[in-house]
Structures are given as C-alpha cells and as structure tokens.
Image (cartoon, rainbow, N blue to C red):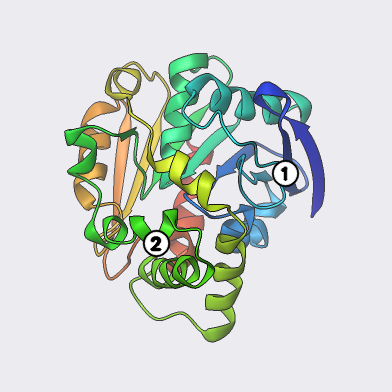
Amino acid sequence: MEYHDVTGGGGVRLRVADAGRGGRPILFVHGYTQSHLAWVRQLRSELADDYRLVALDNRGHGASEKPGDGYADPSLWADDLTGVIEELDLADPVLVGWSYGGLILSDYLATRGTDRIAGLVFAGAISKLGTEDALAVIGEDFLDLVDGFESTDAEESVDALSTFVDRCVHGELSPRERYRLLGYNAVVPPGVRTALHSRTTTHDDDLREADVPALVVHGEEDGVVLPAAAEEHADLLPDAETSWYPEVGHSPFFEAPERFNRELRSFVEGL
C-alpha cells in the first residue's frame, strides 16, 4: 500500500491509498464519517493481484484536509475525484461509491459526465439529499442519530457514532473491528458531519443519462439506507444489474467481502 497527497477541489489536500500492481483502476469512495479504511477487505484482497485499487479519504474525513465549508458544492466533490484520477493517471476507472459515496459519484456524473470512467458501482448508496423523496429512502437507523452527529459534546457525539457503527452491519462486530471503525468515524468534526447531511440535491436525471454499465449492490437488512434506494437506482440507471445480499446490512463489501469481491471482479471483467 502506498499513500499519496492529491489536490482536490478548491485546493483541498486529499489523502489517497493506492494498492494493486496494475490492471483496470478501481476507485473506492467511502460514506458518511468513514475513511479509506472502510475498504480494507478489498484493498488487501486478491483483487490487488489484478487491479489497481485506489481509495481516498473524502474531504473532511480521515487524513484529508477538513475545510469549514464547500460540502454543498457538487463541483468540488467532482473536482476531488478528478484530482485523484488525473494525478494518479487512472485510465478509465470504475467508480465504487458506498452510502454517501454514491452521492459523490452522482456529483461527478452531474459535473463531468462519463467520458473518463468505465463503470459505476453503487453499494448501499444514496444519490439525493434534502428532499422528501431523498428522506423516504433514509432509515431511522440514521435519522434518529442526527442530533448526536451534530453535537459538539464529546460524550454525546461518541455515543451517536458508536451506535452508528453498530448499525452499519446486520451482525455483531468484534471488539477489535468495532473500535477500529469508531476511531476513524470520530476523526470527522461535528461541523463537517452537519454540512454533509444538510445538503439539498437530486441527481435522478444525471443517473438516467449515465451511459456506462452499473452494478447496484444492497443489503436486504439495511436500516441506514433503505433497499428502496437500490430499487430506484436500478430503475434510473439505463444499464444496471442489481445484487441483493440477504442477512446483510449497510456494508455488503465488509459483511460479505468474498461475494462482493467476486461480483466486483466479474463486473469489471465484463466491461
């Protein structure tokens, strides 16, 4: 694993993990309050034997810079992904977005289109926020924690994040995994969390115009982003296949990594 500092939108410094020895690039974009470490079961898998696996810490997350504003601007999110693609010379990458990462992928589509990418993967993902339709596919597992996410009281904030980490999976995390996940969730400042979920944007039309293959992956027991979101994405994307994961929650790539990696490989090889 190598690490790079890449310049994103507005000059923000982004930390990027780079694994794999060549082949098609796959760019992983994590979700709300997470980090590139969410993808460890891909970055350290056999996928790295055949593909170049790249995962960034989104702006405001992990080891990337944490500006006080700019989180509502789709062009900045698109510029972040563009910065990674251009500075690391990723030719025709597949973009994989988890949860909030699906919104970032949609921001990229709205601003940059599909000329420089080969495919899209939406995993437990959203593509809209701040509207009645957007709210309809967000589960109570997320909504009833919003006050805690926004809190500047350390104990209240950590309690909300601790509950959120547990709710990101359908089963039970080991103590080691639980505290590792909690650690990188807690790195994200409350102001960033508030800005992230306070956006209002819809990308239905951008998904309808996406002219590259797409894979929609969703856990059947997801209480954070409801399965209805995946059904919407499957209907909107012109060339999409859908894969449902029984007994899996919000993190199919983490909860069922062997299946996810196998399906990701099959998708990429079919491009």
- Side of 146 relative to 40 (left or right): left
Query: Percent position (x, y) of residue 112?
Result: 52, 15
Q: Secondary structure at mark 2?
A: helix
Q: Amino acid at mark 1?
A: Val
**Residue 69 spot, x, y in % from top left:** 56, 32
Q: CA distance from mark 1 to mark 2?
A: 28 Å
Element assignment for label 1: strand
Q: Amino acid at mark 2?
A: Gly
Image height of 65 relative to 208, above or below: below
Q: Is residue 65 left or right of residue 96?
A: right
Q: Quadrant of residue 185?
A: bottom right
Residue at 55 percent of width and 69 percent of height: 182
2 sits left or right of 182 in the view? right
Residue 113 appears anywhere in the view? no
Kindly identify which residue carries mark 2. Answer: 148
Task: Name the spot of residue 257 as percent of width and height, x first.
Answer: 49, 64
The residue to which callout 1 is attached is 16
When asked about the image quadrant of residue 38, the answer is bottom right
Q: Residue at x 47, y 36 (%)?
A: 270
